[in-house]
Amino acid sequence: MSSAAGSRIVVTGATGNVGTSLVRLLSEDSKVGSVRGLARRLPDWEVSKTEWSAVDLASDQSDLVREFEGAHAVVHLAWAFQPTHDPAATWRTNVLGSMRVFDAVATAAVPTLVHASSVGAYSPGPKDHTVDESWPTHGWPDAAYCREKAYLERALDTFERVHSDVRVVRMRPAFLFKRESASEQRRIFGGRFLPGPLARPDVLPFLPDIPGLRVQALHTDDAAKAYHLALRTNVDGAFNLAGEPPVDAELLGEMLGARPVRLPRTAARSAIAAAWGLHLLPASPHLFDAVLRLPLMDCTRAHTELGWHPEHTAPEVLEEFLLGLQQGAGAKTEPLQGRKVG
């Protein structure tokens, strides 16, 4: 991706969980001449070689073609998780906004598009063994997040057929955590009034052990390294990204010194549905249903073709994240603002 003056990389969603890690990594790359970070709200954060633009993908008034002109690559990370009670709003940002990004990439003749897909794009799959990138990507239709990620997989299928001159890479990471994202993710999934300091072993005498609740986790910085490698390597297609080992109640119980207690799916879902219906919990019961059905991913392709290997194990990722929750950790961007409560 090099040129005489250095590469120009545009990153949408540059102030979020993955965006902040990737922008920092790109700014340290001598082969990158400049980075253009797009975000709905401009950050109070200065990074070398990086300039910012205020862009709202939910609005068709943003001139994305102008932002993308002259870029060697566009990394599309922007995503809205809320409001979960208004799926039409997230559809406008996530699906229609992403399709505007794809169209602008083609119009501006950008040679490389790296898109943030997700494990959530996958159809229900096994929990006792892993699947590779050929597993169907139809998502879990009741969950807006999965539905939107799966729809964009189909949109990219069409985009690749029509614009064969654009190199398209699809990253499908597991659940992403880092210390600086703790406050944001608490607000998104647990609610803005959930006290972060309660995320301590001494206040968790037992953990609910729910059938099917076995997932993969990855440090956000490790995911950013995979995106960076995809920019520097002539690859295309999909790549699974996940840390090891898979996370379940047994592993969490060992980490926190808490005893796993079996809890039926129906009881857990009923509690989540009631809290969501009362607007006490942002995470919907439909997303809970999806998590119980997500497959475990095989990352062999990322290892062999990108040379990517995560530096953090899943327990290390979760320990860092839980410490961030307790401390109200964050960063100097609007999405990642640090707060313990509220």
Image: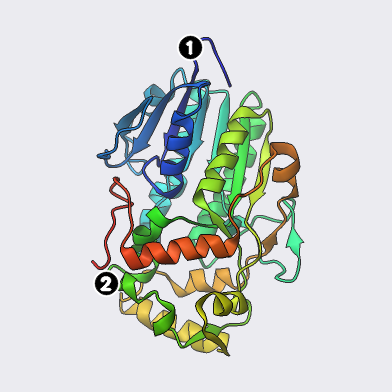
| Tally of numbered discs | 2
Q: Nearer the viewer, residue 98 or 116?
A: 116
Q: Nearer the viewer, residue 225 or 78?
A: 225
The residue that label 1 is drawn on is 5
Rounded to the nearest angstrom, the CA distance separating label 1 from label 2 is 48 Å
Residue at (46%, 86%) from the top-left corner? Answer: 270
Q: Measured along the vertical axis of the image, is residue 9 above or below residue 332?
A: above
> Mark 1 packing: few (<14 Cα in 10 Å), some, or many (20+)?
few
Most foreground residue, 193 or 199: 199
Q: Residue at x 62, y 72 (%)?
A: 214
The colour scheme used here is rainbow
Residue 213 position in % (x across, y down): 59, 75
The amino acid type found where label 2 is placed reads: Phe
**Residue at horizontal 57 percent and vertical 28 percent from the top:** 112
Could you say which quadrant of the image residue 1 lies in? Answer: top right
Along the viewing direction, whichever of 313 and 233 lies nearer the viewer: 313
Q: Which residue is mark 2?
A: 193
